Amino acid sequence: MGWVLQKCLWVYFVLLLQIQRCFGCLEEERIALLEFKAYVNWTDSEYGYGLPSWVDDRGSDCCGWERVLCNHTTGRVIHLSLDDIRGDCSSIWYINFTLLSAFEDLQHLNLSSNWLDGWINNEGFERLVGLRKLEVLDISHNQFNSSILPSLGALKSLRTLSAASNDFNGSNHLEGIYAY
């Protein structure tokens, strides 16, 4: 009879863990989103729209925040819509991609319309290589040039790239990626 009790306790423990995971985002991802918000607001606080639902409150579930979509089973962020987060401004912005490296299950990232011209030294697209599930990347309507293409080619899971309205020159080819 002891093994039945052990088995029941084990099943109860596993179910408890699964139920707990369904009720919110992972703490490391919540912190990463707050760090990204602070970076955006610090970089260009005069023009930034901010992200009002992204609050630094222990009880706040980042899966319920605007522009964030999570997997309901795992609680991991799978979609970030960070398009036009700086508002109507014309100043160039340099992104720190390391701030996005915590999102291991991220599948879709939209960074369009932010006047992005590049990244902080050693914090470029190569930092996104760890995002092994990233399939869709939208960097359209920014100021990137062709120098970013080798870094984008390193994103092996990338299937769709939207890069319209940037400063690309010449013929560009990224094998296995649908680019528009």
Image (cartoon, helix red, strand yellow):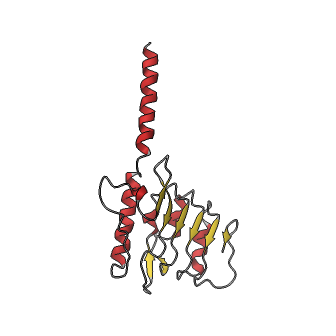
Tell me, yes or no, if residue 6 can be seen here: yes
Numbered label tally:
0
Given residues 42 and 47, the one toward you in this image is 47
Tell me, yes or no, if residue 120 can be seen here: no
- At 43% from the left and 56% from the top, the residue drawn is 63
**Relative height, residue 59 to residue 101 (above, below):** above
- At 56% from the left and 71% from the top, the residue drawn is 138
Rendered location of residue 47, percent (x, y): 37, 81
Would residue 130 appear left or right of 2 to someone viewing this image? Answer: right
Rendered location of residue 34, percent (x, y): 36, 63
Q: Specify the farthest residue to the bottom.
A: 90
**On-image quarter of the N terminus:** top left
Q: Specify the farthest residue to the left.
A: 57
To which quarter of the image does residue 10 belong?
Answer: top left
**On-image quarter of the C terminus:** bottom right
Rendered location of residue 92, percent (x, y): 44, 84
Rendered location of residue 13, percent (x, y): 41, 31
Given residues 153 and 141, the one toward you in this image is 141
Given residues 179 and 20, the one toward you in this image is 20
To which quarter of the image does residue 149 belong?
Answer: bottom right
- At 30% from the left and 60% from the top, the residue drawn is 56
